[in-house]
Amino acid sequence: MADLFQTLVELVTVALRLVVEILQLALTWSLLLVWVAWWLWAVNWKKAWHVLAQGAWAPMVLISLMAAGVWSQVRPSNLVVTPNLAIMNFWWQLGAVGLLAGSALFCGWLQGYFGWTPAEIDLEPPVHHAGHHGDAAHAHH
């Protein structure tokens, strides 16, 4: 009976350690998970592809270049890949920004491939038509 209790204690300990490690992993990658979730389930890519095709790709490219340029000036550093290979400042930041933009576009492709279009949310107030006074105008007749 003592062996069974010891095994149960070890099982609970290992299960708790697993939960802690999964939470640590989720926190480590949380920003990337939120990034992917946003582009995959919050953006309506049926509309976004149309807007990008009409010319919105140009500001997107310029914003990406600006973000890489600002990042390279705020935190200048070379990316050391191996002792004999380093990627120069700005170029590795541009690659990282390009990977983020590419991952957003890939999420858009996935959304279209699997048909995961998010529900439409109308943020505009309802339009009142001229000549329609509603129920309040009829209340005092």
Image (cartoon, rainbow, N blue to C red):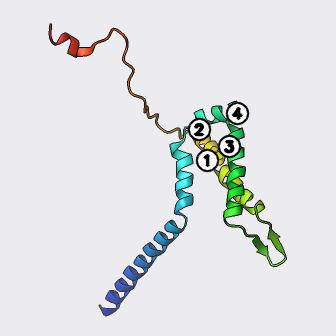
Proximity of marks 1 and 4: CB atoms separated by less than 8 Å: no
Which disc is residue 55 wearing? 4
Which residue does the image show at 37% across and 80% down from the upper left? 12
**Do the numbered discs 2 and 3 sit on residues whose CB atoms are within 8 Å?**
no
Residue 119's disc number: none
Residue labelled with disc 2: 45
Front disc: 1 or 3: 3
At label 4, counting other C-alpha atoms closer than 10 Å, the crowd grade (few under 14, some 14-19, many 20 or more) is: few
**What amino acid is at disc 1?**
Cys
- Reading the image, the residue beneath label 3 is 60
Q: Nearer the viewer, residue 129 or 43?
A: 129
Distance Cα–Cα, label 1 vs label 4? 20 Å
Q: Residues within 10 Å of mark 1 (few under 14, many from 20)?
A: many
User: How far across and down, in percent of the image, does residue 132 sit?
Assistant: 31, 11
Q: Circle 3 — which element?
A: helix
Question: What's the distance in space between the residues labelled 2 and 3, CA to CA?
Answer: 15 Å
- Find residue 55 and report its horizontal and vertical position in percent: 70, 33
Residue 13 to residue 33: above or below:
below
Q: Which residue is mark 1?
A: 107
Callout in the foreground (2, 3)? 3
Q: Quadrant of residue 79?
A: bottom right
Q: Position of residue 10 (x, y in %)?
A: 39, 85
Which of the marked residues, 2 or 4, is nearer the chain's N terminus?
Answer: 2
- Residue 108 point in image, percent of width and height: 61, 43
